[in-house]
Image: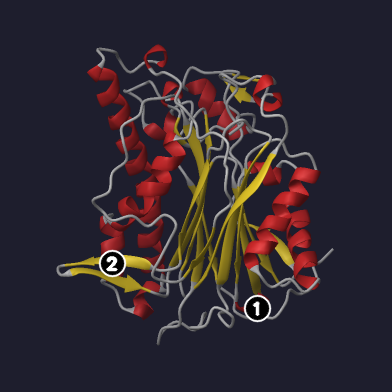
Amino acid sequence: MGNSLEGFSETNESSIGGPITEKETERGYMMKTRDDRYSSTGSETSEVKFAVSSMQGWRATMEDTHILAPSLQIPTPGGYETLHDHALFCVFDGHGGNFTSDFAGDNFLRIFTQRPEWEAYLSMSASERREVPGVKLVKSALFGAFFDIDSELRTLYKKKIEMYGGSMNPKSMSRGRSRRKKVHAVEDERDSQSSSRQPSPQSMPKVVVDRSGSTAVMVLLTPDHIICCNAGDSRAILCRDGGAMPLSFDHKPNSPSELSRVKDAGGFVRYRRVDGDLAVSRGLGDFRFKMNDAMDPTLQKVSIEPELIVCPRDDDNDEFLVLACDGIWDVMDNQECAEEIQNVMDSGESDMGNICENMLDTCLKRNSRDNMTICVVTLPSGADGIKPIRD
């Protein structure tokens, strides 16, 4: 929440009487398989451990969600098999309502794993997957899934609007309801057979119409590559050999390439916001900025087109991944975030959930006013402690 000005006022913060500091935290680890040299069977000894924690903070509603999939299910004629040496981690930062972010959290895995490129990738041998053709297939599957999920969202919007005799225009789309105050913190142990967001292919969410949207940042971890896919201003970094490497770059309306597209689509940027309202220029939903049916989805005022970065894995130097919404990055840059996590680990903390919760508390103290979600994933070089961060 926080990227859209529509419906927001200072009373939204003051009305809750203070920040909502209860946290929802999940932990997990990857299993060991014969061909997976990156992880092991025990939760205490696994080299790939992860956790995510979320806090509502000063906002009157909570609109973040996420995916933790330490293994991926493969459809087969007889049901499903599990791919243990691949993992997907995602953070979705909703705004203007929680429907879009919830839909993404509930459905992205289904959409991604049904892409023909993913099926082609699975048909390859392990050695073929690590080569350029295999990487291209995975990139194409992730890229296409963004367009597919936005198309499904748009169809749901249209059906609901038509049900009431409306049309697909901004005035026809009412503002959706958001999740209210979180009452209980939840801590779940996760193994490779479970995920906070890994529904059956048959599950579909209820149809709700609102003006919501969501940023999306995700990392697909394969035995040989780290593949990041991003749309919006949520962000991912890799700590390698003590240095914080960006895996994504923010899509802000005032950046030259984004500004040019917004103007070409008939929009404007004021106060660093699309049409004076939206603070991101790419993402899911936000259909009032995607109204030109004759225009390619990549050229709309708000584009669905994600950017992808592929990074070969380096077992000797890769330490941890961080995925987080802008509630974290508003008060920390990439280097500060890596250093803060290192400091907590250096103090002797090994519980990944506690590390994530500490980061939320730190950002709240730094006066982050947004919803906050952070996911941290340890990699082999970071399993026994983090190397000093480079200056």
Q: Is residue 348 left or right of residue 178?
A: right
Which sits in the foreground, 199 or 249? Answer: 199
Alpha-carbon distance for marks 1 and 2?
A: 29 Å
Residue kind at label 2, given as amino acid type: Ile
Q: Is residue 273 left or right of residue 113?
A: right
On the rendered image, what quadrant is the C terminus found in?
Answer: bottom right
- The reply to whether residue 337 is in sight is yes
Q: Residue furthest front?
A: 183
The residue that disc 2 covers is 74
Give residue 25's position: percent from left, percent from top: 58, 57
- The reply to whether residue 332 is in sight is no
Q: Residue at x 56, y 27 (%)?
A: 260
The coloring applied to the image is secondary structure
Q: Residue at x 65, y 78 (%)?
A: 381
Numbered disc total: 2
Give residue 4's position: percent from left, percent from top: 57, 26
Give residue 348's position: percent from left, percent from top: 77, 74
For label 1, the crowd category at 10 Å Cα-Cα, with few meaning under 14, some 14 to 19 and many 20 or more, is: many
Specify the quadrant of the image occupied by residue 340. bottom right
Residue kind at label 1, given as amino acid type: Ser
**Residue 381, numbered label:** 1
Establish if 118 lies above or below 368: below
The earlier-in-sequence mark between 1 and 2 is: 2
Q: Residue at x 26, y 54 (%)?
A: 201
Which sits in the foreground, 268 or 204? Answer: 204
SS at badge 1 = helix
Which sits in the foreground, 71 or 149? Answer: 71
Q: Is residue 390 left or right of residue 312?
A: right
Q: Is residue 26 left or right of residue 156?
A: right
Q: Residue furthest right?
A: 391
